[in-house]
Amino acid sequence: MTQTSRPGREVHSGRGTKTFDRVPGGFYLVGALVTLFEVIALGAVGLGLVVGDPSDDGASPDKVSRRVEVTYIVTGDHPSVNLTVGRTNGSHKSEGIVVLPYRKTVELATSADYYLDVRSREGQEGGTLTCTVLVGGKVVKQAHNTPDASSAPCAGSATDAPQRGVIAVPTLTPGASPLPEERRLTGTVKVPDYPGKGSPVIGTVTDSSLEYAELGGTWDRSRTLDPIFDGFTRKQEGRRRALVKSTQVDEDIMAAAGGTGELRGVAGAVLDERRRYEYPRDQAILVDVASQPLKVDGHDAWLVVSEIHFHKRGVPSTMDLNAVLVVDTGRVRPSVLWVVLPETNKKLWPDLNTLVDSVQVR
């Protein structure tokens, strides 16, 4: 009978013992879990590289807020205006007084809105004002002030579509000429002899110890005024705001001139007072043209001729020629003849020479 032998236990030396035979069985499960974790982690990193980080500004243009160029343009017939810019539903920032024409380009997000408001300065109300907004070089908004309003607002969104039709971008030509620097003569300069025929003389006016020519042509007849309300006792009106007025110099004006009766100072004080009451407050500039002493029937007199530059609503003229002749008639207060001739009717300027040459003391 053949005897089958049982397989004997494989015996190795310590050096040749199998590694796995030496590892406890529980460690196999731990190793498998670690390996699985590493595979998942590496897969997530790879997926991130493919998809990209949504917070990465340079990764996807669709995820980044787009920006556009927005241009503000303001034009008008004033030398300067008050300007406010900002957000339609947010804060507004006053730019203060800006010189026209005005143009500024900024970058805004396509979702942003804009607000632009242009207003006439105090004392310069009226005239033409236009605000224009361009987005990407196209006109999306344009507004003009109405005849009775002193502002033009533009508000909208950077996503606004260009306006239909041909909306011209305003030409950036200067608006009304800026007012010049104040200039007051301290020396003697004779009044110019203004060329032209001038108006005919149809009679004389006697008032406040003065006698002077009454003008015809486009002038109305001279009439009496109430000095309490009008400040003068005689008045003659001509075309386009031309005026001739006469009276005795007011006591307050004499006081403003120092109370000395010095005729040159009195003439200057009369001119300052007329500017204060007849022209936009603090925005009318005096530029002296002539300042000279005269003799009227042997009486001392002083003549001051000035350009008064201004901007006034509804008035086409931006400069009036003003003349003040103060005559010492021998009374307590001197008499004055005030003449206003607008630049829009220079045909009347020779009337200044006619009036000054005609003055007599009565």
Image: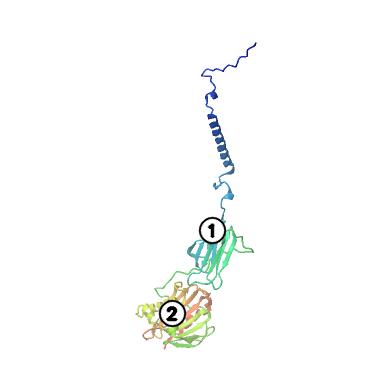
Relative to 292, residue 118 above or below: above
Relative to 232, residue 160 above or below: above
Residue depicted at x 44% and y 83%: 229
Q: Nearer the viewer, residue 223 or 142?
A: 142
The residue type indicated by label 1 comes to: Thr
The spot of residue 194 in percent (x, y) is: 49, 78
Check residue 246 in the rendering and tell me which mark sits there, or answer none. Answer: none
For disc 1, the neighbor class at 10 Å (few under 14, some 14 to 19, many from 20) is few
Q: Quadrant of residue 68?
A: bottom right
Q: Nearer the viewer, residue 355 or 108?
A: 108
Relative to 236, residue 188 above or below: above
Q: Quadrant of the C terminus?
A: bottom left
The spot of residue 311 in percent (x, y) is: 50, 72
Q: Is residue 232 left or right of residue 116?
A: left
Q: Is residue 156 left or right of residue 321?
A: right
The residue where tag 1 is placed is 105
For disc 2, the neighbor class at 10 Å (few under 14, some 14 to 19, many from 20) is many
The residue where tag 2 is placed is 324
Element on which disc 1 rests: strand
Residue lying farthest to the left in this orientation: 260
Q: Nearer the viewer, residue 168 or 56?
A: 56
Which comes before the other along the chain, label 2 or label 1?
A: 1
The residue type indicated by label 2 comes to: Val
Element on which disc 2 rests: strand
Would residue 74 be seen by someone viewing this image from the given angle? Answer: yes
Q: Which of labels 2 and 1 is toward the front?
A: 1
Q: Quadrant of residue 254?
A: bottom left
Name the colouring of the figure: rainbow
